[in-house]
Image: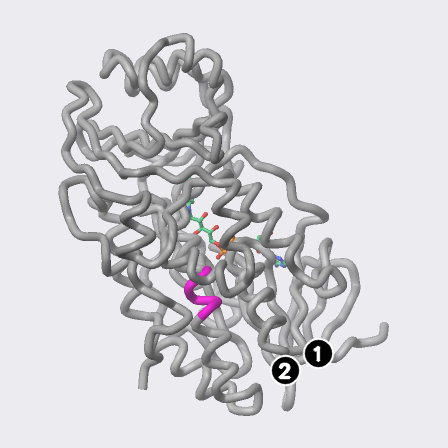
Amino acid sequence: METTHIDIAVIGAGLGGAAAMALLDKSGFDAHVFEQAEAFSRLGAGIHVGPNVMKIFREIGLEDRLAEIGSHPDYWFSRDGRTGDYRSKIKLGDFAKTEYGAPYITIHRGDMHAEQVEALPQDRIHYDHRLVDLEEREGDVLLTFANGHRVAARLVIGADGINSMIREKLLGPEKPRFSGWVGHRALVNMDKLRASGLDFEPCVKWWWEQSRHIMAYATKNDQSEYYYVTGVPVDSWPHEAGWVDSSREEMEAIFGNSHPVVNALIDATETVTKWPFWNRDPLSLWSQGRLCLLGDACHPMRPHMAQGACMAIEDAAVLVRCLSETGIGDYRAAFDVYERTRRDRATKVQTISNANTWLKDPEDPAWVYAYDPIHAPLAT
Ligand code: FAD
């Protein structure tokens, strides 16, 4: 079969890979993105997007559109799950715009991803391309896909998630570690919520003993969709599947007899799924030869800081800046500056996210939200 020659192959068109592809294209690189899925669907889950990443969407040309779709909470509240007492009230809304330089939004991740993918040059996104083999050669990397296509790329960016094949090539096979935590995810019935007559705040994290929690928030600008994700410690994940069905009864067993708003949230739950959270220790290297990692391939984390995808997108922005400065020919220098610019910040976020302490009590989040990945100095 014929081999196609390109400069840069991005493997995986998830939230990080799609951002990398958009920025590479904008910077004039001959880049293509290869995704194993045949198509993307609107999976039922929400996501927070901090001002740190809205600045990258500004660069891509998507900030206004995402701001139009997403919800703009005025605060991130942390509350006691039983008494409802406020532990912290972190200012967002207009404060985020003026102090951090961009809005803070919560949004359905399917809606955000659809906008990201639609904004890409469609002839450069290749679905149904599951990478199954790669061979590093003298001047390029030969990629072989499950559908039989072969591509020779001068550089390969592994944005292929926690089970990354590129990571495995760099560091050898190693399964991610079960973190001991699961999350339940549900989009709840708005009519039932409204019928309760209670106030469902646009962004609130409810806390119980052992840091068990429910993070609940709106995913649309008009507040017509409400979503929650939990964090619950468990002994093991005995399932083969990536997620399993849960139930309102399971939610009641874990969080029942709580504050009336929480009880109403559980009452309004119709469909809820349960997901294991996987982890890895910080990697000993982020790139080697012509291969480079970003996002969950590089630093997966428990999701409790709502910054995992944000770190993937920040990685993408900094990596493309580094490549733009050096040009493709000096890719080793670009990968080196990229890793030195990103490693401390990504590892710090990974550590705090795994500890599940973020914004539980009053703290200043400026170091995360005010950061500007498009203009911040690169490591020297
Ligand atoms: P992924 O999104 O996993 O994308 C990887 C892509 O690569 C996929 O499309 C996959 O199909 C493709 N792929 C894999 N292998 C191959 C292959 N061999 N060939 C071709 N394609 C391949 N983050 C936030 O910032 N804010 C939040 O509020 C937030 N909430 C979360 C809630 C939960 C419950 C969870 C589990 C995570 C949450 N995250 C959040 C984290 C976020 O989802 C991840 O960090 C983010 O999706 C990582 O992006 P990525 O592009 O690195 O990987």
State the residue at coordinates (30%, 20%). Answer: 254
Q: Secondary structure at mark 1?
A: strand
Q: Quadrant of residue 233?
A: top left
> Is ligand 1 closer than 8 angstroms to the Cβ of mark 1?
no
Chain-order first, disc 2 or disc 1: 1
Check the picture and name the quadrant holding the N terminus. bottom right
Q: Which residue is mark 2?
A: 154
Residue at 35%, 31% in the rendered image: 202
Query: Residue 326: percent from the left, percent from the top?
Result: 49, 88
Residue at x 59% of width, y 54% of height: 116
Depicted 376 relative to depicted 76: above or below: below
Tell me which amino acid carries mark 2: Arg
Image quadrant for the C terminus? Answer: bottom left
Whether label 2 touches label 1, CB < 8 Å: yes
Kindly state the secondary structure of the residue where label 2 is placed: strand
- Residues in magenta, as a range: 313-317
**Residue 346 drawn above or below residue 195:** below
Residue 316, magenta (yes or no): yes
Q: Which mark, residue 331? A: none
Left or right placement of residue 164 versus residue 124 in this view: left
